[in-house]
Each structure stands twice: as structure tokens, then as C-alpha cells.
Image (cartoon, rainbow, N blue to C red):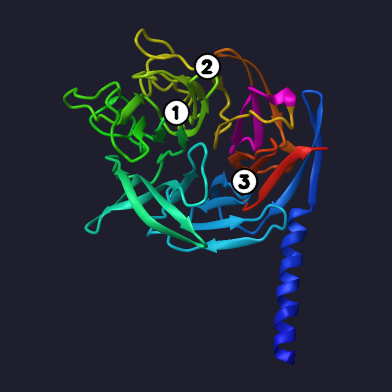
Amino acid sequence: MNKRNGWHLLLVCLLLLANAAHGAELLLRGESAGMRYRVEQVAAGLGVPWGLVLLDDGSLLLTERQGRVQRLDPESGWLTPIAGVPKVRVRGQGGLLDVAVPPGYRAGDWLYFTYVKALAESDNRGVTTLARARLEGDRLRDWQVLLVTDSATGTDRHFGSRIQFDGQGRLFFGVGDRGERPNGQDRSNHAGSLLRLDIDGQVPADNPFVGQSGIRPEIWSYGHRNPQGLAWDAQHGRLWEIEHGPRGGDELNLIRRGGNYGWPVLSYGKEYWGPIAVGEGTEREGMEAPTKVYIPSIAPGSLLLYTGAAFPGWQGNLFAGALALTHLNRIVLDGETAVAEERLLGELNERIRALAQDPQGWLYLSTDSGRILRIRPQ
């Protein structure tokens, strides 16, 4: 081995050791529901890791809002850049958003993404877009745009957008009101709605508004401000959603087919500029009431239904990452009712965004400071 190659090998070894050190770093210990847990740092130095999903080989695929996809080995902390990402419009709250895989995913199957793209070369307004691609080695191939939503406005906020599958060949994803409140009740566009599609992008024939004039057939529910989390309960066949309210009034909702969730007519929040209620009240016939309301706002970043064996006391609980109040929110359900909550990891003072559960029942979460953390039994 010559001297140059020797130095190169030494550098590679040092980088591997540095990455491995991230995965071994203990951040804190805690207890919840009578169970002890530890929180570890798996990786650091990222941008804003917006989406996070477990692949079948045990690695994590993550999206960064600035338009980058990386694969993470959670044991070593090693990050591998993934090529083949299309041009993403990164501005304000927009960029590369969620990544998700359908149940039973195997290597070579479709991966699904939401991201913001410019409406056209001559129109740079951003719109939430659903696409899919296959991962081959370290590159995304066969990129297919499934739906460019009709959601363009003059703002760069409230793009949504999480993806969730029902296990029956359908997917849901959300689009925020795009900063224009009337969109919540306007079904002639996609803004302020949860959308439901076949996994190939077609509109299911049993969507609630198919064939109705002036209504987008992809809409499953509407009256949403900015959906930031979706969780499918396979045992009971129901969809949970969590969204940002205005100043106060974040909502956890049980989503019903064709439901109107009230925004901006109904709200528990206040105007940002003063102590004035948003909307006309909190209840109205024909509009769905939230399961849980957060006052003050926690600014939810995600939603996960825990089904793992590692923490039996958490089974059937919902978890939401909190951005403004910097904690992990655990919601205890009794059927369709939220009966209790617990706020975890507040000591970290981190804006918690994406959540994922591995086959062991360990939890992975991302933070806006660019870290990937893991919660496992102590």
C-alpha cells in the first residue's frame, strides 16, 4: 500500500468512526406508562429532515426540506446520498416533504413522495405534488408524478403534507389551505383538503364527491387548515389526522368520508394580531368536531399510531411531534375519544417533526436541528 492510499484508508476509517459515534450517543433516560426508555442520537448535521420511513433492509430513508434524500444505517449512523431527486421548489414552508412506503414494501417497490414544485416555467407559484419512484442502489428511478394539486396561491405556506396508506390499495395525503382561508370550504380546488387516490394515482370510484359538478373528485374530506400528520388504524379501519390551527386551536381529528372539518368557519384559535376569535364559533351542524384541541398550540409536525411490542403500555396510543412546544406528544385513546396525554422529551428543547416505528417497536424521530433520534427500552 502506498502512502497516498494509506492516508485515504485512514480518512475513511475516521469518518466511519465519527458516524458510528453519533449512533451511540445517549441523550437522556425517561419513564412513561411504567416503562423505562432511553433516547439516543443516531445521526446529526442534516438540514430539516421532513420525512422518515423504514425500508425492508432496516435502513431509514429520509427527506430533507431543501431537496435532498439520504439513506441512514441506524446502527452505524452512516448516511448515503440518494441521486435522482427532481427539481424541488424550496421556499418558505415548502420543499421536499414526506416519503412513505405501502404496507408490505420490498426492495424495488414504489416509494411515494410529496414535494413542492413550480406550477410552470412561466408561473413560479408552488403547489403540493404527489409522486412515486423506485430505489435502485443509491438512485431513484422511474420518477412518476401522480398528481399536481390545484392549490396555487401567492403564499409560501401551508403545503401539508403527509402520506398514509389504508392497506387496501388506496393512499391519503393532505394539502393545507395555502394561506388563504376560504380554500378550506372551497371544494373546486385541492387546498384545505385530504385527498384519496389509488396507489397508481387514479381516483377511486367510491370517493365521496365523484361525479359532482364543481368539486374535485380526489377530495376525501375538507375544511382543514394545514394537515401535518396522518395515521391509519388498520385494526379499526379509521384515519386519524392532526393539523395546525391559528394561534391556539391545533386539532386532532378522526376523519370521516366526505366530512367537513370546519375551517375557517369553525376554530378554537385566535388571530395572530390580537385576542379575536377566528371564525364564527366552535360548533355547527353538518361540520365535524375535533377529537382533541390544543390551546395553546403545540404546532404538530407528524402523527403515528404505535403498534409495537417494545413498549406494551403505548400500544394503541397516538404520537405527535410538536414543533412550537418542542416535545413528543403521547395521546391515549379510548375508542374514538382522547382521554389523556403525556408530553415527553421536553428536556431536549427540539422541534420534533417526523416519526417512524421499526419492526421491534423502537421509535425514530427527526428534529428541525438536523438530528435523527431513537427511543428504545432501557
- Magenta stretch containing residue 345, yes or no? no
What quarter of the picture does the N terminus occupy?
bottom right
Instruction: Give residue 366's mark.
Output: 3
First in sequence, mark 3 or 2: give its number.
Answer: 2
- Residue located beneath label 1 in the image: 271
Q: Position of residue 27 (x, y in %)?
A: 78, 46
- Amino acid carrying label 1: it is Glu
Q: Disc 3 on helix, strand or loop?
A: strand
x 80%, y 42%: residue: 28
List x then y, in percent, for residue 120: 24, 54
Task: Classify mark 2: residues with Cα within 10 Å, few (<14), some (14-19) or many (20+).
Answer: some
Q: Is residue 82 visible?
A: yes
Residue appearing at x 42%, y 11% in the figure: 283
Residue denoted by label 2: 291
187 vs 115, left or right, is left
- Who's the residue at 41% across and 18% down the image? 256
Q: CA distance from mark 2 to mark 1?
A: 22 Å
How dense is the environment of label 1, judged by Cα within 10 Å: few (below 14), some, or many (20 and up)?
A: few
Left or right of residue 143, residue 212 in this image: left
Please say if 26 is above or below 174.
below
Q: Position of residue 253 (x, y in %)?
A: 48, 21
Where in the figure is residue 229, as x and y percent of width and height?
A: 51, 33
Q: For the residue labelled by badge 2, is the local secondary structure a helix, a strand or a loop? A: loop
Q: Residue furthest bottom?
A: 2
Label 2 or label 1, whichever comes before in sequence order: 1
314 magenta-colored = yes
Amino acid at pointer 2: Thr
Q: Give the amino acid type for the residue marked by disc 3 in the picture.
A: Ser
**Nearer to us: label 2 or label 1:** 2
Query: Where is residue 220, by image quadrant?
Result: top left
Check disc 1 and report its element: helix, strand or loop.
Answer: loop
Which range of residues does the magenta coloring cover?
A: 312-331
